[in-house]
Image (cartoon, rainbow, N blue to C red):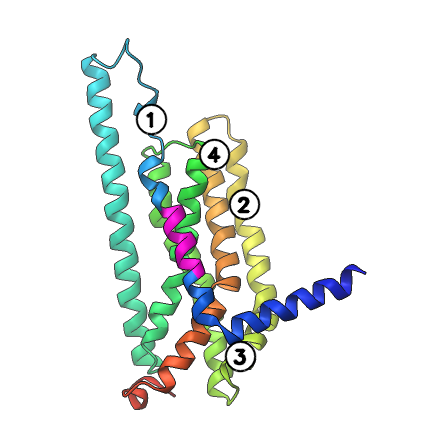
Amino acid sequence: MAGPRIEAATRRLNATIVDRPRTVVVVFLVFTALFAGGVGLVSTESDSTDSFTEDLPEQQALDAVTDIIFSSAIQGLILAVGLTGVFLVIAYGVLERKPMLGVVNVFPILIAIAYLIGTMRYLGLSLNALTATILSISIGLGIAYSIHATHRFIDEFNAGKDAHEAMVVTLTGTGGALLGSMLTTSLGTGALALAITPVLGDFGLLMALSVVYSFVMAVVALPPAVLLWDRYHKVSPFVGLTGA
């Protein structure tokens, strides 16, 4: 009984992604904004300050350092996303003459980071000198899943398949390899969650979550974004420059 239901649900989801990719992308953007909105609510090490220590010079110095760490983490995240997007646009423009696919590649990782921030808020994990680096590191770890999937898509797309068929082949062919990579990486980094030091444990947990989120978004959020790219690049006045 479960088999036919799962198959029917898969067909409905597939039809939704194919017929209304713009709607799917907008839904992801809304959820991304909701989760990313919690960045200002993520606790820091200084949040545990009480009335007995808040006036101490040492505590004030710690609060100042924590504020610097938080601001530098956000600045580093913005810089990493910007540089990654620019590099991918140039790379896809030079190698494949499809520069907008560089922007498409950044879309899933932005959602993954937003979900990671929301998870930090939900679990009550503090932002410190170690966990603050996760936001930027997750871009380097997670973007690989989107790049691998997009590269396979381009191979199938250039071979003559339409965008939907090329993406189906991509997910069925490359999806298994990406799943194996996600499992080994997340389990390896997630083992740090068992560390005695709480800060190191939080770091390992967030690393594992960032990898899992990146994989899921590369499989779920990337296809509608690619299909939306296919619709627009066909009618682009620069299709001779950006298309195959």
> Mark 3 or mark 4, which is nearer the start of the sequence?
4
Q: Earlier in the sequence, mark 2 or mark 4?
A: 4
Q: CA distance from mark 4 to mark 3?
A: 38 Å
Residue 45 numbered mark, or none = 1
Magenta-drawn stretch, dominant element (helix, strand or loop): helix
Which quarter of the figure has residue 59? Answer: top left
Q: Are marks 1 and 3 in contact (CB under 8 Å)?
A: no
Which is more N-terminal, label 3 or label 1? Answer: 1
Residue labelled with disc 4: 123
Q: Residue at x 40, y 55 (%)?
A: 30
| Residue at left offset 36%, top offset 51% | 33
Q: CA distance from mark 2 to mark 4?
A: 21 Å
- Residue at the spot 57% in from the left edge and 51% down from the top edge: 184
Mark 1 and mark 3: Cα distance apart in space: 47 Å
Q: Quadrant of the N terminus?
A: bottom right
The numbered dot on residue 188 is: 2
The answer to whether mark 4 and mark 1 are in CB contact below 8 A is: no
In the rendered structure, which disc, 1 or 2, sits on the residue that comes first in sequence? 1
Q: Nearer the viewer, mark 1 or mark 3?
A: 3
The stretch in magenta equals: 27-36
Q: How many marks?
A: 4
Is label 3 in a helix, a strand or a loop?
Answer: helix
- Residue under numbered circle 3: 164
Residue 117 in picture, x, y percent from top left: 40, 43
Residue 29 is covered by the magenta coloring: yes
Point out the frontmost of discs 3 and 2. 3
